[in-house]
Amino acid sequence: MNKIGIIIAREFNERVRKKSFIITTLLMPVLMLGLMAAPALIMLFAKGETKNIVVIDESAIIVPQLTENEEVNFSVLDVTLDEARSDADIFGVLWIGEDVVENPSSVKLYTNSSSSMSLESSISSQLERIIERERLKRYDIENLEQIIEDVKVKVSLTTFRNDQSVDGVAEEATSSEIAYIMGLALGMMLYMFLIIYGSMVMTSVIEEKGSRVLDVLVSSVSPFQLMLGKILGVAAVAVTQVAIWGVLVCGIGAAALPSLMPEDVMQTVEAVNAGQMTSVEADIDADLLSVVSLATDIGGLVMIFVWLALFLVGGFLFYSAMFAAAGSAVDSIQDASQLQTPIMVPIIVGLMLSMTVATDPNSALAVWSSIIPFTSPVVMMARVPYNIPTWQIILSLVLLYASVVAMAWAAGKIYRVGIFMHGKKPTFKELLSWMKQS
């Protein structure tokens, strides 16, 4: 154990002291927030120039009701369709047939360059609303449009969990949208950790094998001790990074966020958390309320980071054993690609399955994929924000860590033989024969 401890300390210190580790640790939370905000920013800055469209309305009904926006500018010219189409200074021509109310398909858009889905959708939605209003007028009912507008309703549904009641009072559930976003972020984080740190172990083994450092080290420690120490050392780096993120997130939630939010908002959040009112009764957007409530719930955040650390360690040990075995069997990173692909496929499948959790976090597919060790680290972290039963999380962890023992034993067999093999890339059949050697 002393020898393993020395190897762990070496691997840990070698990586933690690098500037790249410090920079990544501090910038990763910012990067994750940036990735979450990226779609909105892209939509904001991806807006093109306003399109000038000439409208030729043979029905004389639609034009007066068309409204302009940032995307399209409508104009009416006393010209024929052919004359309007020959004008290269405009973006396009919108032709509306005389019977458009009876036949909504009698609409054509002629453009002088490529159109876009958003532009066509904007024009179509306007035409639909106008035609609907014109059809309603034919029923000759006074204030019909206002009546229809008055009967429209939007239901704000508050969900309560009977299985998480306190003293017979059901607890209000977290917003499904917030749970989905958080689950997706946690699943993506596990995916990145498994790929990045697993590849780091494999690369380290290949480099040390190529420089013949391993031939010297195995004179003092056994191959299994060397592999285990290397894996645990890198795992300690990953846990340290997650712990730092946990402290930063919990610190921001406990100290910074309450001082940044308006006092009335924080009072409302505290009232909802205390069960004095529901999110519907609160005069705040439900999603905003859920985010602030979650960010200021230190106990809940700590528990999420505890689960994250446990699944990170388990998933990393499980996959890094395979990465280490693959690295020991080859002499270069290029040769490792063939052996690396079967290892990465289950991780990618796990990420894909985690995206289906939003449909039903308790479906058979979601439950089983979060328990099977090959996909459980990524999928289970995507399910955790939905407050799933604790026994499912514990069962998943037990099976994952039990599989780590079996995988470490099998990888150790390959590692023991592979580090002494040079000049030939083994086949999968040969790897199986190495595992069978006593």
Image (tube, rainbow, N blue to C red):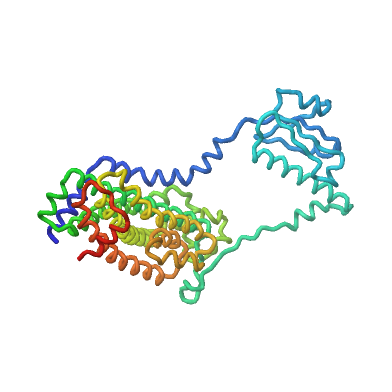
* Image quadrant in which you'd find residue 388: bottom left
Query: Residue 183 location in percent, x, y?
Result: 45, 57
Callout count: 0
Query: Residue 45 location in percent, x, y?
Result: 54, 35
Vertical order, 267 against 209 (above or below): below
Q: Can residue 27 be seen?
A: yes
Name the residue nearer the viewer: 302 or 237. 237
Q: Residue at x 65, y 31 (%)?
A: 50
Vertical order, 73 against 284 (above or below): above
Name the residue nearer the viewer: 123 or 261. 123
Q: Residue at x 24, y 42 (%)?
A: 18
* Image quadrant in which you'd find residue 152: bottom right
* Quadrant placement of the N terminus: bottom left
Query: Residue 340 location in percent, x, y?
Result: 34, 51
Outermost residue toward the left in this view: 220
Name the residue nearer the viewer: 425 or 127. 425
Q: Residue at x 10, y 55 (%)?
A: 220
* Quadrant placement of the C terminus: bottom left
Left or right of 289? Residue 68 is right
Query: Residue 4 location in percent, x, y?
Result: 16, 58
Q: Residue at x 47, y 52 (%)?
A: 263
Name the residue nearer the viewer: 410 or 401. 410
Left or right of 330? Residue 38 is right
Vertical order, 26 against 352 (above or below): above
Q: Can residue 251 be seen?
A: no
